[in-house]
Amino acid sequence: MAKKKITKTAKPMAGRKRITLSLSAPHAEAVYLMGDFNEWNKKAHPMKQETEGDWKKTIMLQPGRYEYRFLVDGRWQNDPNNYQVCPNSFGTVNNVLVVSP
């Protein structure tokens, strides 16, 4: 008789919060949300132009502290709607996002 393999599956979305970030960039061709939550990978979170000039992206994040920036047509830009920043290793600053439990 074959043994049944019992596996426990964690709920991947358990504890995560829905976070929507937006940026007004009316002349942009492409905008990416990049941060330590996606290993600064622009392919992970391309933003979508919702209305003329307004780009948005909704992501799911576990509670914690994250650093991020926008990449707008190949140029880094900070979030003008978030004044929480911290220095980065490139001599500029990253935005800080704190997701509470």
Image (tube, helix red, strand yellow):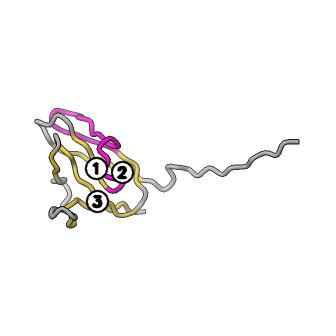
- The span shown in magenta is 36-58
Packing grade of label 3 (10 A; few <14, some 14-19, many >=20) is some
Is there CB contact under 8 Å for labels 2 and 3? no
**Which callout, 2 or 3, points at the residue further toward the start of the chain?**
2
Q: Where the N terminus falls, by quadrant?
A: top right
Packing grade of label 2 (10 A; few <14, some 14-19, many >=20) is few
The amino acid type of the residue labelled 1 equals: Met
Is there CB contact under 8 Å for labels 2 and 1? yes
Q: Is residue 75 magenta?
A: no
**Image location (x, y in percent) of residue 15:** 48, 56
The amino acid type of the residue labelled 3 equals: Glu
Identify the element where label 1 is drawn: strand
Tell me how far mark 1 sits from mark 3, CA to CA.
Answer: 9 Å
The amino acid type of the residue labelled 2 equals: Asn
Identify the element where label 3 is drawn: strand
Q: Nearer the viewer, residue 92 or 18?
A: 92
Residue identified by numbered label 3? 67
Residue identified by numbered label 2? 38
Tell me how far mark 2 sits from mark 1, CA to CA.
Answer: 7 Å
Q: Which mark is residue 70?
A: none
**Which callout, 1 or 3, points at the residue further toward the start of the chain?**
1
Q: Is residue 90 left or right of residue 14?
A: left
